[in-house]
Image (tube, helix red, strand yellow):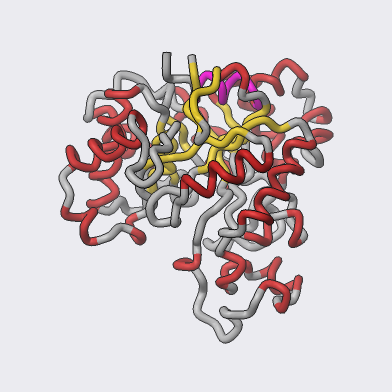
């Protein structure tokens, strides 16, 4: 089976080490917290403030810098990385042409998403669209490519959800299910903290006719570590994604401390012991400049660098690590015969 990258079809078994949930070129300035320092340039932001309040600075939330992201991607390649799934959907300023350029410059495969982020970013036009029309647009981007460049999407998502679910989010979810039924393309879904509404979301997808959830990724499971909940989700057949590795130093937006990378690894080890190895993905969700190596973050290399010793300490074998980093993403991303 082939994966659909921004530079064409690639045998999914040749993607290599894959990060299934990242952002390379996106704009999150909508989420900037109002404050007197919001417009400081990156070089003027005190490092301690950047660590403690990353959402306070617009410059930090705008990742649209091809030279810098290429540098960060090359670091990932230097650690043996092969592919990155870029999940900036409509609402986060996706740019497939830019993704193709940085993919070629860094020598890293990039898979782009199609769809829409959370309801907060939905336009009035989208809110007026029918489910059928939304699905038609997703299918077109998967099969033919976007209208501006012809670059095809290789994943549906990340599809945004909130708590409670908004009407337009429900429409997009239903459209995503229909698009998967027509293309077999995987779906990645963004959830509010604690996987809020996760079972409602799965029920919505099932109601649209999805016969199984083995090509549905439940993102951000590790912002609140609840292994029992995660096992219930995986018992429904979905893939769980621990995708905030490296995000352990700054406060979470809901007032609780982020788990440490060691806690994430130990939770994964529990899930593996309980038989769920084939339903786990790992990534970083780098979505702001302060998470890049250039600005003191851990970049796209953390899982292959600092976390490697934690996996070993937790007793996770090299064979199991291959499943997490290579085989599980390849199975998910290969959908074109």
Quarter occupied by the C terminus: top left
Question: Which residue is drawn at the image coordinates 48% and 39% (left, top)?
Answer: 112
Task: Please state the total of marks drawn on the protein image.
Answer: 0
Q: Does residue 164 appear left or right of residue 85 in this picture?
A: left
Q: Is residue 101 left or right of residue 184?
A: right
* Residue at (70% x, 66% y) in the render: 51
Instruction: Locate residue 212, reporting x and y percent.
Output: 35, 20
Residue at x-position 44% and y-position 46%: 191
Check if residue 327 falls in the magenta segment: yes
- Looking at the rendering, the stretch of residues picked out in magenta corresponds to 325-333
Note whether residue 129 is visible.
Answer: yes
Looking at the picture, does residue 95 appear above or below residue 39?
above
In magenta stretch: residue 260:
no
Using residue 244 as the reference point, say whether residue 113 is left or right of it. left
Front-lying residue, 70 or 172 = 70
Q: Quadrant of residue 201?
A: top left
Residue 179, given in percent of the width and then of the height, sits at 29, 31
x 32%, y 27%: residue: 180
Q: Is residue 273 left or right of residue 167?
A: right
Image quadrant where residue 132 sits: top left
| Residue 274 in sight here | no
Report the predominant secondary structure element of the magenta stretch.
helix
Q: Work out whether residue 319 or residue 271 is closer to the camera in this orientation and state it.
A: 319
Q: Nearer the viewer, residue 313 or 244?
A: 244
Residue positioned most to the bottom: 36
Tell me which corner region of the image, top left, top right, bottom left or bottom right, holds residue 206. top left
**Image coordinates for residue 292, horizontal then vertical, percent:** 70, 55
Point out residue 220 in the picture as x, y percentages from the top left corner: 53, 44
């Amino acid at each position: 089976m082939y994966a659909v990258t921004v530079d064409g079809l690639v045998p999914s078994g040749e993607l290599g080490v894959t990060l299934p949930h990242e952002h390379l070129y996106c704009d999150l300035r909508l989420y900037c917290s109002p404050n007197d320092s919001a417009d400081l340039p990156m070089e003027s932001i005190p490092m301690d403030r950047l660590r403690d309040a990353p959402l306070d600075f617009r410059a930090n939330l705008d990742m649209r810098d091809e030279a810098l992201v290429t540098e960060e991607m090359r670091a990932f390649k230097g650690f043996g990385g092969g592919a990155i799934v870029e999940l900036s959907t409509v609402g986060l300023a996706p740019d497939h042409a830019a993704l193709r350029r940085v993919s070629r410059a860094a020598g890293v495969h990039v898979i782009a998403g199609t769809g829409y982020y959370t309801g907060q970013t939905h336009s009035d036009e989208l809110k007026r669209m029918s489910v059928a029309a939304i699905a038609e647009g997703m299918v077109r981007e998967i099969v033919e490519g976007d209208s501006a460049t012809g670059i095809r999407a290789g994943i549906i998502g990340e599809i945004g959800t909130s708590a409670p679910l908004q009407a337009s989010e429900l429409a997009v979810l239903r459209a995503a299910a229909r698009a998967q039924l027509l293309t077999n393309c995987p779906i990645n879904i963004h959830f509010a903290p604690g996987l809020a509404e996760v079972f409602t979301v799965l029920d919505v997808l099932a109601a649209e006719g999805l016969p199984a959830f083995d090509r549905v990724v439940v993102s951000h499971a590790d912002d609140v570590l609840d292994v029992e909940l995660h096992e219930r989700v995986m018992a429904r057949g979905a893939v769980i994604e621990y995708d905030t590795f490296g995000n352990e130093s700054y406060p979470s937006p809901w007032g609780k401390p982020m788990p440490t990378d060691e806690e994430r690894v130990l939770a994964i080890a529990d899930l593996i012991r309980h038989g769920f190895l084939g339903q786990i993905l790992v990534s970083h969700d780098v979505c702001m400049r302060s998470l890049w190596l250039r600005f003191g973050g851990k970049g796209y290399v953390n899982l292959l660098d600092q976390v490697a010793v934690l996996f070993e300490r937790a007793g996770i074998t090299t064979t199991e690590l291959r499943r997490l980093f290579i085989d599980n993403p390849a199975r998910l991303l290969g959908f074109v015969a």
